[in-house]
Amino acid sequence: MSEFGFIDTIRSMFASMPFNGFEGIGDDCAVFPFGDGEALVLTTDLLAEDVHFLRRATSPFLLGRKSLAVNLSDVAAMGARPVASMLSLALPRELTGEWADEFMRGYHDMSQRYGVQLVGGDTTLSKSGLTVNVLAIGRVPAGNIKRRSDAREGDFVMVGGRLGASAEGLKDILHGNFDTAYAMQHKNPEPQVAEGIWLGTRAEVHAMMDLSDGVASDLVHILEASHVGAVVETEHVPAVTSVERAVCGGEDYKLLFTVEPEAAERLMSEYAAEFGSRPFAIGRIVASSDPVIEWRENGRAFNPDWHGFSHY
């Protein structure tokens, strides 16, 4: 069973139960409206040693920062402002002293950067490696929430920054080069929090999510939820390395979003004025009964076997 096949099984298992005000599984965050036109969004993410990180390759400070950053990226992808987090740690005994203190300094650094209070969590002893679990909570006007299911035919597909640095950094790390510029970007991502909040206020932005597994997988989630297809022009992908690595590598934590075509140029200009660089338009949403990406290079379709990261 694939990772997302497993998620679909879980979704089906719980479909007949009451949702108690929550929106169901399917976006970067769960959504809970709480009155006065506002909603809370909640997300959780696990980082497991030797799956998401190598302890020998990263400092506890940077791992603490990244543990929260990847969750704040999900909150930003909903157009929400992060407000709080909860942290649970399964720590091997040798990490319960100075290492844990440095980890928490990094976690506090990222929390302070975005005004995110730590409001609870749990700790336990681990006999099989380090595991980190974070719950992040955001707050957003209900009308600003961006979902994967709102892409429309004709929309431009955009990304909020250059892609592939994290994948290149992971390659460096796996070759024993822990301190290259790319390796540092892999170990110390910066979530697009301000950009997500700003894009949430824009009615011309339809669907949005963050890039954790790569365009080749993450864009398909938008297509499936919105019942559409997409064309991606590979020469427009803002790759810092090969296009394949840029769209398949994952962990860039840039925003992926679709924009009404008539407003696209204005939005790109105003985004640049606000954040210092333009987003990149890499393709279009098209009508399709099959939620797939058609890859084109200089106008010519080709059929690469490109897939983003999957755990299973």
Image: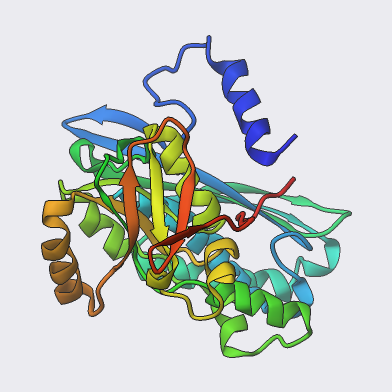
Outermost residue toward the right in this view: 127
What percent of the width, then of the height, locates residue 168? 62, 78
Q: Measuring 41% from the left and 58% from the top, which residue is drawn there?
A: 232
* Point 52% across, 11% down: residue: 17
Task: Residue 242: name its quadrant.
Answer: bottom right
**149 versus 46 height, above or below:** above
Up-down: is 49 above or below 105?
above
Q: Position of residue 160 (x, y in %)?
A: 34, 66
Work out whether residue 83 can be spotted.
no
Q: Is residue 275 above or below residue 159?
A: below
Q: Is residue 279 left or right of residue 274?
A: right
- Asked if 61 appears above or below 191 in the picture, the reply is below
> Between residues 115 and 264, which one lies in front from this camera angle?
264
Question: Which residue appears farthest toward the front when viewing the image?
Answer: 300
Regarding residue 287, the answer to whether it shows in the image is: yes
Counting from the top left corner in percent of width and height, residue 230 is at: 39, 47
Nearest the eye: 244 or 24: 244
